[in-house]
Amino acid sequence: MAEQTVLDSSEFQKLAKRRAPKGKKAKKEEKIQISISKYVKAQYPDVIFNSDIASGMRLPIWIAASAKAMRSERGQPDMVFLEPRGGYCGLCIEVKKDEAQVFNKNGEMKGGKSAGHLREQVAILERLRAKGYKAEFGLGFEDTKKIIDEYMLL
């Protein structure tokens, strides 16, 4: 693998800033995914990864329908790193903007109207682990970056 460039988080936060199209506001998870993508491209330029473009974005119905038709099922992780490390086939991360999106204050998984989709995501991550992938929730930029950095050191 190529020599790594060591940049701190604040440098990547600056790198990741972008303007949403006029009248549009980028969602927090989308911004985190863009930041993480830029980070990985700079830190690990030889790593092949994919980021789910349909994840959390408001898309025209015809594009959303096409994206749905091209996936095996709902709940798939936002980012997939096709880089075997430490006995794993690859790394899969479901990106969330923060811990509050997944867990209640008491540490239990959230309920409510988003609970069904969250359960789908948990089930997919468990299935991926059973198939030999490292599969995790990334809670914000720093947590997701830490998961990736630890994985790349395996």
Image: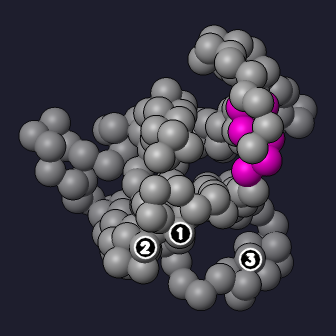
Label 1–label 2 contact, CB within 8 A: yes
Judged by depth in the image, the label closer to the viewer, 3 or 1, is 1
Q: Which residue is mark 1?
A: 89
Q: Position of residue 31 (x, y in %)?
A: 67, 36
* Residue 92 in view (yes/no): no
Q: Which residues are magenta?
A: 41-47
Rounded to the nearest angstrom, the CA distance separating label 1 from label 2 is 6 Å
Q: Secondary structure at mark 2?
A: loop
The residue located at (16%, 36%) in the rendering is: 105
Q: Which residue is mark 2?
A: 132
| Sequence-first disc among 1 and 2 | 1
Amino acid on which the number 3 mark rests in the picture: Ala
Judged by depth in the image, the label closer to the viewer, 2 or 3, is 2
Identify the image quadrant of the N terminus: top right
The residue located at (65%, 37%) in the rendering is: 36
Magenta includes 74? no
User: In the figure, residue 71 lies in which quadrant?
Assistant: bottom right
Amino acid on which the number 2 mark rests in the picture: Gly
Query: Mark number for residue 67?
Result: 3
Rounded to the nearest angstrom, the CA distance separating label 3 from label 1 is 24 Å
Can you say whether 138 is above or below 78 in the image? above
Amino acid on which the number 1 mark rests in the picture: Cys
Can you say whether 15 is above or below 54 in the image? above
* Residue 129 in view (yes/no): yes
Q: Secondary structure at mark 1?
A: loop
Residue sitting nearer the eye, 130 or 85: 85
Magenta includes 46? yes
Can you say whether 29 is above or below 49 in the image? above
Is 20 left or right of 68, judged from the image as shown?
A: right
